[in-house]
Image (cartoon, rainbow, N blue to C red):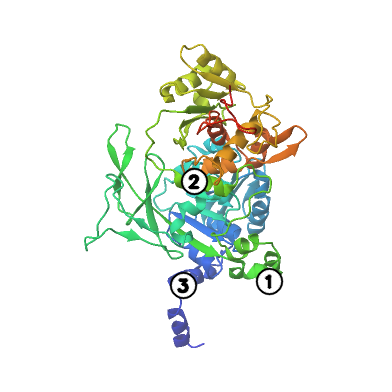
Amino acid sequence: MQTAEVQSALDQLTPNELRLIDMLSDPNCIWAPQPGPQLEAYFSPADILFYGGAAGGGKTDLALGLSLTAHQRAVIFRRVYPELKGIIERLKNLTHGMGKYNATEHVWRGVVGGKRRVIELESIQHEDDKKNQQGRDRDLHIFDEVPNFSESQVRFVIGWNRTADPQQRTRVVLTGNPPTDPEGEWVVKMFAPWLVAEYRVTLTDPLTGKVILGEDGLPIELGPAEPGELRWFVVDAQGKDHAVRDGTPCYVKGVVDKDGDLTLVTPKSRTFIPARVTDNEFYMRTGYMATLQALPEPLRSQMLEGKFDLKTDDHPWQVIPTAWVEEAMARWTEQRPDVPQSALGVDVARGGKDRTVISPRYGTWYAPPLVYPGTVTRDGDAVAALVLNAREGNAPIFIDATNVGTSAYDSLKRMDGVQVTAVVNSSGTKERDMSGALTFANLRALTYWRLREALDPVKGDGLALPPDPVLKADLCAPRWKLTARGIQVELKEDIIARIGRSPDVGDAVVMALMTPAKPPQFHVPGTYSQPLGG
């Protein structure tokens, strides 16, 4: 080609494609992104990037490529450590003869491009495992298959996405496919501008809550975002996102310094860049696309096309249908009804990794659960103090009387005027379901089934549940089976083993319904005529 022809061809390339040529021209280059979504993701200026959506889009290679060529200290997370095996093997292939991987520490160290690089491979299986990452500075945080993590795990850990090197940028990369269970739906909410077709938000001042007006005097509204487009957000003291116009520092309600004074908050930018197997020339050569095409729906559309507006069917033995929980959350409003507090459900932490949860209920309306780390509820007196602080009037208290819960029950029982019931989930019951046909293996099965019946959109009580993704995941996690003793709900220990954490928020909500939300006017077989804990 003549010089003029080369220059003409270069003039037609995008800035990122020109950067790719520079990378490939470096004789020391060990990895470069593929043209297309992977390239755009590599050079994206977003503080928080969600990449992927479909299977086979090169998510693992992007994570390792960024770690090896653009950052000095990176960490790659999977929910459980065995899932890191494929990433470790790919890392060893990319760095063959370079650096060293320490299998004991799960850390690779080496020099690439004249800079020392460190890549840590970590897991955050249980909710409180996130605290093991506290204070550990990294300039790149990567959560691979992010829907498998809880929102609180991700938000907590990326608080240490920082560096002391002013020349080193910091960023967070989340990779994954559409969530296949309620626990991962927080990802869709966090990236709603890109994933929810009907997304629309009116901008409000994050300090005063007042609607922001444009030059035309009308409220400023933001609609859906294009792939790769940046949007900016700040997070208030309650952990709630607020969309803002740009990255200009601003004051946020409740965010103060150590002296209690308002402090400026710098908004963080986010974006989503979709990628499919058709964007990965290496997988396209192997026939992986045919594997994805053979999946059953809706997994096929989720994994092949990256569709986030599809949902997998509930497990056939799921106690409470997901749609029922969603309807109850859609009914919820921040305005509490003008009725006395009906009950408190209390699930007490079994250890440092669990949480003590207090769920206040007012008739058919549930207040947001009060959640405390197990480290602050080490004994019964500490739990009792928190419960009494949340109690209003003569509301009855239902407390899980196991382990430290027994001590908390004893503390409350000694107090005058406190109506407290010890909930022993393994105890028997003679109650029947609403139809009068089914019995229950134990109290745990009965209380979960009563919540199911109260959430029934046709025959239920019209409960209003706070729109909390953790609560939704907890209530949709338990499964049931029919035994000779009647309905049996999955043990808490089995749920913990399956989802990697304790469903303590859901359990507290269940116990708060141990007095009927709407007392029956008359008793018929299969209904309950007295408090379930009575």
In percent of the image, x 46 and y 11: which residue is there?
416
Mark number, residue 381:
none
Residue 210: x and y in percent read 26, 49
Residue 187: x and y in percent read 51, 52
Question: Label 3 vs label 1: CA separation?
Answer: 26 Å
Under tag 1, what secondary structure? helix
Under tag 3, what secondary structure? helix
Q: Is 1 above or below relative to 285?
A: below
Tag 3: residue type?
Leu
Report crowding for label 1: few under 14, some 14 to 19, many 20 or more residues within 10 A (C-alpha): few
Residue 399: quadrant of the picture? top right
In-front residue for pair 259/11: 259
Q: Which residue was labeled with disc 2?
A: 138
Q: Which residue was labeled with disc 1?
A: 285
Q: Does residue 312 appear to the left or right of 257 in the view shown? A: right
In-front residue for pair 355/169: 355
Tag 2: residue type?
Arg
Question: Label 2 vs label 3: CA separation?
Answer: 29 Å
Mark number, residue 18:
3
Of label 2 and label 3, which has the lower sequence position?
Answer: 3
Of label 3 and label 1, which has the lower sequence position?
Answer: 3
Report crowding for label 3: few under 14, some 14 to 19, many 20 or more residues within 10 A (C-alpha): some
Q: Is 319 above or below relative to 531?
A: below
Of label 1 and label 2, which has the lower sequence position?
Answer: 2
Residue 113 in sight in this render: no
Q: Where the C terminus falls, by quadrant?
A: top right
Tag 1: residue type?
Arg
